[in-house]
Amino acid sequence: ADTLAMVQARVAKKDPEAINHLAQKHFFGVPGLLQKDVRKAIKLWTEAAELGSIDALYHLGVAYYRGEGVQQDAAKAAEFYTKAAMQGHVVSRHNLGGCEGDKLNHDRAVRHFLISAKMGCKDSVETINRASMVGFATKEQYAEALK
């Protein structure tokens, strides 16, 4: 309860990371402390993103991709992932690769996975490996991802 009060004090001062943190608490709920409220989480993530939280951009991308608390919208998810990825968010870059793969844009997908692999995302390395086994990526691209 004390921690929540401290977070809420930071939220009142428009701290984007505190707002992002509170959004996550609302998204999952905190037993005996905070009711799960996905719509409230979306509202808070939107505010945090507008104030500069890269993690909030990522969480909004996930919400739109999965249709959690908002209408499912892969294009909107990709917009949020792009904004976060352009600021260095590794998992957003990986997820952009997935979005491109969903649209069968395999070359673009592999380029995103290569970038996130070079940033340390092991899931991207594994994805490039699997893509190379079915002809969507080259063995050279997989070797590059391993570097």
Image (tube, rainbow, N blue to C red):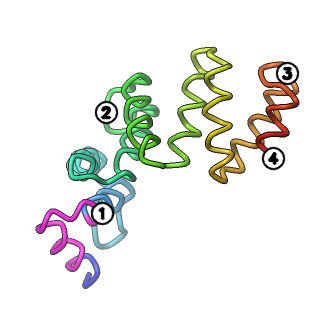
Residue at x 27%, y 48% (from the top left corner): 49
117 vs 76, left or right, is right
> Does residue 94 sit above or below 72 in this rendering?
below
The residue that mark 1 highlights is 17
Q: Amino acid at mark 4?
A: Leu
| Magenta extent | 5-18
Residue type, label 3? Val
- In front of the other: label 3 or label 4? 4
Q: What residue did someone put label 2 on?
A: 70
Report how far apart the C-alphas of labels 3 and 2 lie in the structure.
34 Å
Q: Residues within 10 Å of mark 3 (few under 14, many from 20)?
A: few
Q: Regarding mark 4 in the picture, which secondary structure is present there?
A: helix
Q: Depth-wise, is mark 3 or mark 2 nearer the camera?
A: 3
Q: Which residue is mark 4?
A: 146
Residue drawn at x 79%, y 27% is 131
**The N terminus, quarter of image:** bottom left
Q: Nearer the viewer, mark 1 or mark 2?
A: 1
Precedes in sequence: disc 3 or disc 4: 3
Q: Earlier in the sequence, mark 1 or mark 4?
A: 1
Q: Which mark is residue 134?
A: 3
Amino acid bearing label 1? Glu
